[in-house]
Image: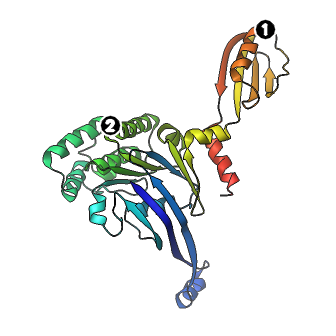
Amino acid sequence: MIEVKNIHKSFKVSKRQAGVLASFKSLIHPTYEVIHALNDVSFTIDQGEIVGYIGPNGAGKSTTIKIMSGILTPDSGSCQILNKTPWKQRVEHVKNIGVVFGQRSQLWWDIPVIDSFYLLKDIYKVDDITFQETLQLLSDTLDLNNLLTIPVRQLSLGQRMRCEIAASLLHNPKILFLDEPTIGLDAVSKIAVRNFIRKLNHEMNTTVILTTHDMSDIEALANRIILIGKGQVLLDGSLKDIKEKYITHKTVTVDYYGKGISLNIKGVEVVSQTEGRLVLSVNIKKSKVSELITYLAQHLEIADITVDDRSVDDIIIELYKEYSI
């Protein structure tokens, strides 16, 4: 469905020192720096996948999305989406995609949201019946009914983001590009948006490419991660495989009554022990958590016990360090 092959993209950025004199000097003898945003980027995405496209600031995520959506033309390489080249067949291409940029709006600032929706209806040539059915579904799911008559400039960031997502879906696209879609959303709205994206993917088989710094979005939605850094794809794999590789330890916290115990179990390290609480780090390559819990239940009067994995945030930070990005 999506095939990106050997994409390169560079930008020429002007540079100058601070001050009036430096400004005049830069007019006469401007200096430039070439930024290599993308360097031989290749990947394929199948229909119905939800892919987390992640990396630090400046890694090239938004540049990739803009190329795939037809906004930018690469210096070299190819990109085929539904057998179309985005920047060459843009009119036909945009009928099949929806794009949400968290920092940019596709809604008209001074008019009510519903007027923007009607303008988008005409742009994409959506028939009246389909538009009304889709609008009703989006309004109910994203709780937009009370927002449609309000000018966009009077909406909060979270309200606007929900309207942006709805606007990108009015023409029922086959592919949805989401660049920081939950930015500014409160906890309730985040959950609603995530549930809606999952429902869209499950029921409509919509392909979703998600870029975000919020790893809880990735964990909740993505079944595959593409890690990009310094303009290159560094890692491409399922979230499950990445967890299996990088989650080598689990933390077991035990609240208990009475006296504690001393432990000498292979693969188990005592992190801390206070009166009534024991925190253990378990190397799951060397010891089974289930066997440890059975042992603890036999030797302690347990009040409560919890088992925690490493967070996805910790894994991503380790990946950044591993690849020096």
Q: Is residue 183 visible?
A: no
Please name the residue that numbered disc 1 is placed on. 258
What's under tag 2, amino acid-wise?
Answer: Glu
Q: What's the distance in space between the residues labelled 2 and 1, CA to CA? A: 53 Å
Image position of 288 (left or right of 108): right
What's under tag 1, amino acid-wise?
Answer: Gly
At numbered mark 1, what does the secondary structure look like: helix, strand or loop?
Answer: loop
Quadrant placement of the C terminus: bottom right
Please name the residue that numbered disc 2 is placed on. 203
Indicate how the structure is coloured in the image. Answer: rainbow
User: Quick one: 240 or 307, which is closer to the camera?
Assistant: 240
The single residue placed furthest to the left in the displayed view is 128
User: Quick one: 162 or 124, which is closer to the camera?
Assistant: 124
- Residue at left offset 30%, top offset 61%: 93
- Residue at left offset 51%, top offset 70%: 8
Considering only vertical position in the picture, is 144 above or below 98?
above
Considering only vertical position in the picture, is 289 above or below 312?
above
